Amino acid sequence: MTDIVVVFHSGYGHTQRMAQAVAAGAGARLLAIDADGNLPPGGWEHLKAADAIIFGAPTYMGSPSWQFKKFADASSKQWYVQDWKDKLAAGFTCSSGMDGDKFNSITAMFSLAMQHGMVWVSQGLMPSQMRASRRDDVNYLASYAGAYAQAPSDAGADAMSPGDLETARLFGERVAAFAAKLKT
Ligand SMILES: Cc1cc2nc3c(=O)[nH]c(=O)nc-3n(C[C@H](O)[C@H](O)[C@H](O)COP(=O)(O)O)c2cc1C
């Protein structure tokens, strides 16, 4: 049995819906970074025990939200003792723009994972980029390094693209499949 944690921040609920979809696919537990950038009690212990940690944050001003960055900086304690070394890592983000500099958020998560000596899992889905492709197709945003979602800035979290949420679920499944392989 693998132990996978989705640790994420969400200001307005969009990334939270993504996190729920990733967790559903991975069979993971959710660990929310709060509005002050802190984990709930026991959060660091959960991360230490995990086989895989999936990072999630909204893209704000071209990078992960400051709350996620506070969490990342706080993980320097774990870095000192290499608590997360050889765990699987992966990342996802949501923003309003079709691009919106989401890649910068994923690379911030990638760099965090590399500093911790983790092993990065890519998105692993082919992009939906044909003329016949539709917005609600899986991986319509054509990401490779992590999972993307996009939600118009005047739309609530309830109006997210079903294709983006399915992309997130499949992404979680992929991380879980690798975690299971490493356990055998
Ligand atoms: C402070 C702030 C900065 C933002 N910067 C960006 C940005 O750089 N690119 C973008 O596409 N969307 C940007 N957005 C839009 C959010 O990424 C988008 O609304 C996202 O769905 C929010 O996720 P959340 O509900 O999990 O907080 C920004 C929103 C806020 C509040």
Image (tube, rainbow, N blue to C red):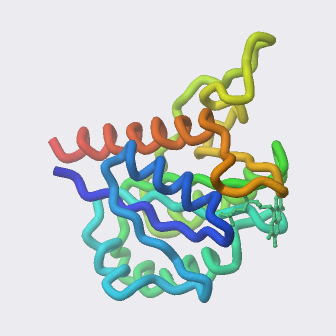
Residue 67 coordinates in the image, percent (x, y): 63, 80
Residue shown at 47%/45% (left/top)?
121
Ligand 1 shown in quarter: bottom right
Does 165 sit left or right of 64 as displayed? left
Q: Nearer the viewer, residue 43 or 132?
A: 132
Relative to 174, say whether 77 is above or below.
Answer: below
Relative to 120, say whether 111 is above or below.
Answer: below
Q: Is residue 62 visible?
A: yes
Q: Nearer the viewer, residue 5 or 115?
A: 5
Residue shown at 36%/81% (left/top)?
44
Residue 34 coordinates in the image, percent (x, y): 54, 81
Does 29 sit left or right of 20 as displayed? left
Residue shown at 69%/79% (left/top)?
66
Residue 104 coordinates in the image, percent (x, y): 75, 57
Does 112 sit left or right of 78 as displayed? right
The image quarter containing residue 141 is top right
The image quarter containing residue 174 is top left
Quick one: quadrant of the C terminus? Answer: top left
The image quarter containing residue 53 is bottom left
Q: How many marks?
A: 0
Q: Nearer the viewer, residue 9 or 104?
A: 9
Q: Is residue 86 visible?
A: no
Residue 135 coordinates in the image, percent (x, y): 73, 28
